[in-house]
Image: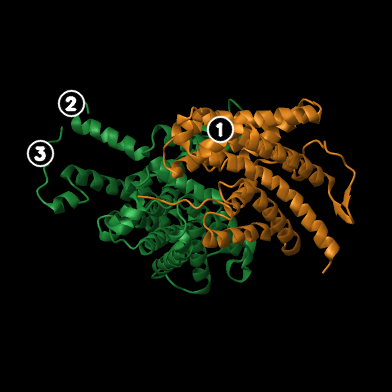
Chain colours: A orange, B green
Amino acid sequence: MDWLFFGEISLAGLAMGGLYALIALGFVIIYKATRVINFAIGEIMMFAAYLFLAFAGGMEMSPWIALPLAVIGGSILGGVIEKTMIRPMLGESPISVVMVTIGIASILVGLVEFIWTADPQLLPNFLPREPVFIGELYLAPKIAYGFLIASVLLIIYLLYFRFSRGGVALRATASDQAAAYSMGINVRRVFNMAWVFGSLAASLAGVLVAATGGLSPQFGIIGLSVLVVVIVGGLDSILGALVAGVFIGWLETVAGAYLGGEYRMPATFLVLAVILVIRPYGLFGTHEIERV
Amino acid sequence: MRIGDAKQSYEADEAIWTSPTQKVWLGLFLLILLIFPFIVDSYLLYLGCLVGIAVISTTGLNILTGFTGLISLGQAGFMGVGAYTVAWLSINTALPFPVTLVLAGLMAAAVGILVGLPSLRVKGLYLAIATLAASVFLHFIFAEWEAVTGGMGGLSLEPAHLFGMKFQSDFMMYFIIVPLAVLMVLAARNVFRTRIGRAFIAIRDRDISAEILGINLLRYKLMSFALSSFYAGVAGGLFAYFYRVVTPESFPLSMSIFYLAAVIVGGMGNLLGGILGAAFMTLVPEALKLLTAALTPFYPNAPVFMSPMLEIIFGALIVGFLIFEPHGLAEIWHRIRRFFRLWPFRN
């Protein structure tokens, strides 16, 4: 066995896993606060990436201006989706809410094809090009810097939710909605903020992933990998999102490299199936007790 | 206004067709179904067959999702199992189509039971994701198990046959598909008058309460999975006979979502809703195609925008129905019926 190759593949996988962790974090924020499983997260990422393409490619802005603009655009999209389509579904069955997000995903794919056509696109390169070496291991620069940017946002998020007022409000709402409401927390605003913050994380990850792998209206498929991550980690666990994100990213890349691309999805879904049978609420998720 | 239909026995209350008017309308409808293929052109006939297949599959999913409350994202996978079973049997054996279709249904039901096994431990959205995992595995098997499924190239099969008669054209297929669809919807309607169907509904309404009432959850959930995937398998088998080619890409995840959307747009937990939803969702893209064709002389770009418009309309229909008409087309239908029944009074 070639350990150097294995090391390089693993490193690339772990870096990809960092991006998954960021997307999964966005997913978990939304789930924790509003109990909505967001099947449209891949499409929100895609939309932000296309915005970046429009700003940086079409309007020829500097990528470092286009990136924040695209991310802000993506988070506004998240806020608007919550206000117009998720809010009216409050109190409906989870099946219906999930189907609404699937519908939103379809609308976003259509919109993107409408504006930017269905052809695959390449994002202008904005990350440094020098190869990165960690010890003897080579790592593609796009993936390495993508991972770096993702980790910065991840750390900001973790600190924000731990210490800031808004973060405490969000965690309070997640743990007991009625109590939070009676303590004067504006629950509606928390719901909206959760969608904005969740979409922000997803949007940044979207641009970074698209910068390494290209962009097309099928980009939203990545949402399925993220779904695996959050189920394995536990839907309401931030720690779970981080650990499972890195693990699934690694597994997917290693399975793809050793067994072939067609094994990527079955490999991760196999882990998902095993986790569902052993620990249905995920590795770190809370086991909800149901009362009649 | 219709008056004086007080029921005097439980049997009358349980009856599927409660009034003579209903029977007359139903008879008329069946008559139209019968003469439909003789009077329409080949395009409408093709659409009729598609709607028939969609009705069978949607009714199956409705049993699972609408009546038992278990969400499934694996419907296309189960249809694939049925389609591959039919394709394999028609290539390797000389069995007539009623046998292969039943075997396709049974095969899909067996896979459905396997997929349903986690349903005792996980439910709700976790279950939806378990079925999603199943559909990923099934797709993988369709694409990779080349000895049986022919790999990515898929399988081409002979036309359906019975007593030496070959069902080659759409016209012939119509007479397999539509009677089967009617039969299977009727069978589903009858299931919900029995203990089994009632148990399904009890599980949907509150599974823990159902268990306390003495319903064996695992058994009935698996039964629901089996029944639903039997329908999917038969629909998949018809799909295989209809197109006479089966590939792994014939049954993508978007197809599972399509059937879920059909159940929702039609009305969850309502068999009439399933029929309306299946017909509606099948015909909307076709209507859009006609519209595009009509617009092309004026806007040469129209065909380019058709596929994105279709995605947007598909999504907007799901979102719109869930927000504004959660009980779906069936509720609209009932409102129209109520209007005529109560006329000249309002409500």
Q: Which residue is mark 2?
A: B344
User: CB atoms at circles 2 and 3 under 8 Å apart?
Assistant: no
Residue B95 in view of the camera: yes
Comparing A154 with B194, the one in front is A154
Q: Which residue is mark 1?
A: A169
Look at the picture and state if B238 lies above or below A35: below
Q: Label 2 to label 3, Cα distance in Å?
A: 16 Å
Q: Which numbered dot is residue B4?
A: 3
The type of residue carrying mark 2 is Pro
What subunit carries mark 2?
A: B
Extreme bottom residue here? B93
Comparing B75 with B161, the one in front is B75
In the visual, does B160 lie left or right of B299? left
The type of residue carrying mark 3 is Gly
Percent coordinates x, y for residue B147 in the rendering: 61, 71
Q: Which numbered dot is residue B5?
A: none
The type of residue carrying mark 1 is Ala
What subunit carries mark 1?
A: A
